Amino acid sequence: MELHMHTHRWEQHSPDWTVAAVSGFAAGAVLMVLELLWSTIIMGASPWETSHMVAAITMGQDALQSTDFSLLIVAVALITHYVLGIAFALILSFFIVSFHFDSSIGMALLTGAVFGVVMYLFNFYGMVQFFSWFAEMRSLATVAAHVIFGMVVASMYWKLEQVQR
């Protein structure tokens, strides 16, 4: 019987980029639904307010002038949101594979949770220097949503990677 010890040192391995992108797309959908539910049900805000904020990343601050429904705003927000979700998933998947954090589902989930916190800090304390309107979204609920995003990416990547083997 062989004993395999998984070390979590960096090795040059490439993730399955397609699996990573699919994981990011799915996790982006989960994050979007969580944000929509939180903002409308708990906060009582317009369901389109977050869409305007996300679209403003691409379209500029003019997108923030209203929180009414606009097909253009929603379309731009969806595209921006999914592109960012996939990009973050590609980064997370690279770390999972390169450091062998895919050795177990637990390790993958932990990695995803930590990545979610780092992603939250990057977005809401780093990028807010360029997109100041996101400062108002700093909250424990937003941290939790980003942790869930990271965990969904990690678990989906882990599971789909197992299927590919």
Image: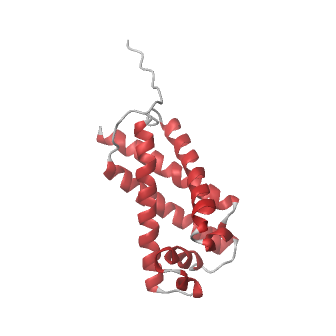
From the viewer's perspective, tell me whether residue 164 is left or right of residue 116.
Answer: left
* 40 shown above or below 121: below
Point out residue 157 in the picture as x, y percentages from the top left corner: 41, 46
Query: Quick one: quadrant of the C terminus?
Result: top left
Furthest-front residue in view? 129
For the residue pair 73 and 41, the one nearer the viewer reads as 73
Picture quarter containing residue 39? bottom right
* 23 shown above or below 82: above
Query: Quick one: quadrant of the N terminus?
Result: top left
Furthest-left residue in view? 165
Point out residue 82 in the picture as x, y percentages from the top left corner: 43, 65
Give the residue displayed 47% in from the left and 68% down from the top.
81
From the viewer's perspective, tell me whether residue 76 is left or right of residue 132.
Answer: left
For the residue pair 131 and 89, the one nearer the viewer reads as 131
Point out residue 71 in the picture as x, y percentages from the top left corner: 44, 85
Furthest-top residue in view? 1
For the residue pair 4 and 63, the one nearer the viewer reads as 63
Q: How is the image coloured?
A: secondary structure
Whether residue 67 is visible here, answered yes or no, is no
* 100 shown above or below 129: above
Give the residue displayed 45% in from the left and 42% down from the top.
95
* 136 shown above or below 8: below
Picture quarter containing residue 67? bottom right
Whether residue 64 is visible here, answered yes or no, is yes
Q: How many marks?
A: 0
Give the residue displayed 52% in from the left and 46% down from the top.
112
Point out residue 12 in the picture as x, y percentages from the top left corner: 35, 36
